[in-house]
Image (tube, helix red, strand yellow):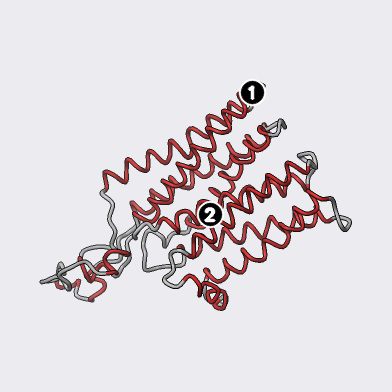
Amino acid sequence: MHPAYSVIVFTTASGAGYGLLIWLAVAAALNLVPRDPALGFVGLGVALALITIGLLASTLHLGRPERAWRALSQWKSSWLSREGIAAIVTYLPAGALGLGWVFGEFVPGQIATGAWLSVPCALITVWCTGMIYASLPTIRAWDQPLVAPVYVVLALATGGVLLSLLLAAFGYDPRWAAILSVVTLALGWFLKARYWLAIDTAPKTHTAEAATGLGRFGTVRPLDPPHTQPNFVMREMGYQVARRHAEKLRRLSVLLLFVLPIGAGLLLLLDLPSPFQIAIASLAALSAAAGVLTERWLFFAEAEHVAMLYYRGGVA
């Protein structure tokens, strides 16, 4: 599939935003951080800004962005509609949490209620994002049970990295957040490696022989191309990245998204001066951002729609 930058920004920015929102909500509910209005304003502000930027970026991939609201009407059958509804609903408890944290509770238990409702709402939204792709059997690389879990774990991991930076910047102890980020990054590394192994070794059932039912006669190939020039389907659904380039980009994403941030998280467990903590956490956040963008670009670039059997024959 053609890696649309708007969708890459959407899935990475909103994922990190939801991850940060989840960890801030848990921290507020369990009193893991002080009820510092400045911390709540900046932390939740960054989380909601990333979520909003991601959601707005997703509309840029549409031919008629002004009609994006119509996608909400198909919630019975569409994961995209479910994601949109879940995203809108998440703003309500997140708003209650933010108002209570920054301005003080208007009603008793406002912070705790908003926090505990924000967590499942955010998790459901990220899960729906992953299921948009995992529910497509016509794309072999996405028709995998690990797609949605990887989306959720990487959201938690990148959100944990941002939380470590936030706590270090405000002079609070970032070690518990560093532990969260290291654990979720390690889990994300494991799941992503299993995902790559799965798409590399899964049976290639999408073949020209299976599509035409002529496999019993031998290899099937088109005599002539259906078009003399690339069309929309070929450009959008037939994007190909060379295998050697994919391997290099996989290694790069592992280095940037997992290895360096995990190393930085382990350094944050040491009793270092605050300036060193801020510098290490900043480098971890920048590395994780570059890594998740690379990982998500590959997620789209390595996928090919079964429709390409019509144009190229062979295996999709």
Q: Nearer the viewer, residue 64 or 5?
A: 64
Q: As drawn, is 75 to the left or to the right of 256? A: right
Assign a secondary structure to mark 1.
loop
Front residue of 265 and 272: 272
Q: Position of residue 14 (x, y in %)?
A: 56, 54
Position of the N terminus, as image quadrant, is bottom left
Which quarter of the picture shows residue 82? bottom right
Measuring from the top left, give residue 212's x and y in whole percent: 23, 76
In the rendered image, which residue does mark 2 sit on?
149
In this rendering, would 239 be left or right of 165?
left
Label 1 vs label 2: CA separation? 31 Å
Q: Residue furthest left?
A: 223
Label 1: how many Cα within 10 Å (few below 14, some 14–19, many 20+): few
Image position of 280 with respect to 216: above or below: above
Disc number at residue 270?
A: 1
First in sequence, mark 1 or 2: give its number: 2
